[in-house]
Amino acid sequence: MGDEHTLILDDVISVEEPTLLIPNKTTPHTPQFLSTAEAARMLGLSTTLVQTLVDQGELKGWKTRGGHRRISLDSIMDYQTVSRHAVNRHAKSTSKPRVTVVIETPGLMNSFMQDFLQWGIPIDVNFFESVTEALLDLSNKRPDMIVVEMSMPRALQEKTFQALENFNKRGHTPLSVVLITQEKGLASSMPFGAASSIQLVPGPLSSIWLHAYLTGVVASCKN
């Protein structure tokens, strides 16, 4: 079972996240300009609204001798960036944070799930019995953070530690990871710098700790 767990975990971790392609901004030496219609298509807005944004100074543009507007591509991309940040702030304030909780000790997960339902904390929590299952689920719904209660042999805990660290190094948006273990000196047995994106918490996992942690997550997301 240990070797099978190791092989599956390696397969899951080796899958890299998709790369988001963001167009490079033009340099000041080679300015580019779009027509009103082209800018409207790029922004997904009406031509009338684009003209209004130019008049208000939100977009930079000028008029040709024939009276046609030419709008700076740089200003269009800047406007997209500002709009995207505004949408992200709105999403952060209106959506529930998502946390994945892995509980490997047999018989504990049902107890923690019942406790969570009684707490009534406004947070989306998904429980799993293994790290492999949790990582496979990342393609369906990526969590904001992951908490792992590790009860496997030390050698597998070290491999899980390193595999999650490698996953974060390859990803464009690293996961916030908390590993709960009763093994002593686990971090010191890893290569130098391996614990940079992973927090180790002494085990065992308790209901009181999980309640406090999830409450803190909700509070931090409101700030």
Image (cartoon, rainbow, N blue to C red):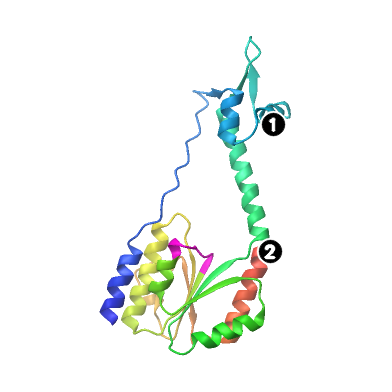
Q: Relative to 116, does residue 199 appear above or below in the rendering? A: above
Disc 2 from disc 1: Cα separation: 33 Å
Tell me what residue is drawn at x 36 percent, y 84 percent.
Answer: 152
Question: Residue farthest to the bottom?
Answer: 107
Region in magenta? 138-145
The location of residue 155, given as percent across then percent down, is 31, 80
Q: Look at label 2 and name its amino acid.
A: Lys
The quadrant of the rendering that contains the C terminus is: bottom right
Q: Earlier in the sequence, mark 2 or mark 1?
A: 1
Residue count near mark 2 (Cα–Cα under 10 Å), binned few <14, some 14–19, many ≥20: few
- What number is the disc on residue 222? 2
| Residue 144 covered by magenta stretch | yes
Q: Quadrant of residue 156?
A: bottom left
**Image location (x, y in percent) of residue 204:** 49, 87
Left or right: residue 35 versus residue 197 is right
**Above-or-below relation of 203 to 162:** below
Depth order, front residue of 76/115: 115
SS category of the residue bearing label 1: helix
Residue 41 spot, x, y in % from top left:
57, 32
Residue on which disc 1 sits: 49
Furthest residue in direction right, as rendered: 56
User: Is residue 59 rendered magenta in the image?
Assistant: no
Q: Nearer the viewer, residue 59 or 96?
A: 96
Badge 1 amino acid: Leu
Our reading of the magenta stretch's main secondary structure is loop
Q: Secondary structure at mark 2?
A: helix
Image quadrant where one finds the N terminus: bottom left
How far across and how far down the image is residue 50, in percent? 66, 29
Q: Residues within 10 Å of mark 1 (few under 14, many from 20)?
A: few
- Of tags 2 and 1, the one toward the viewer is 1
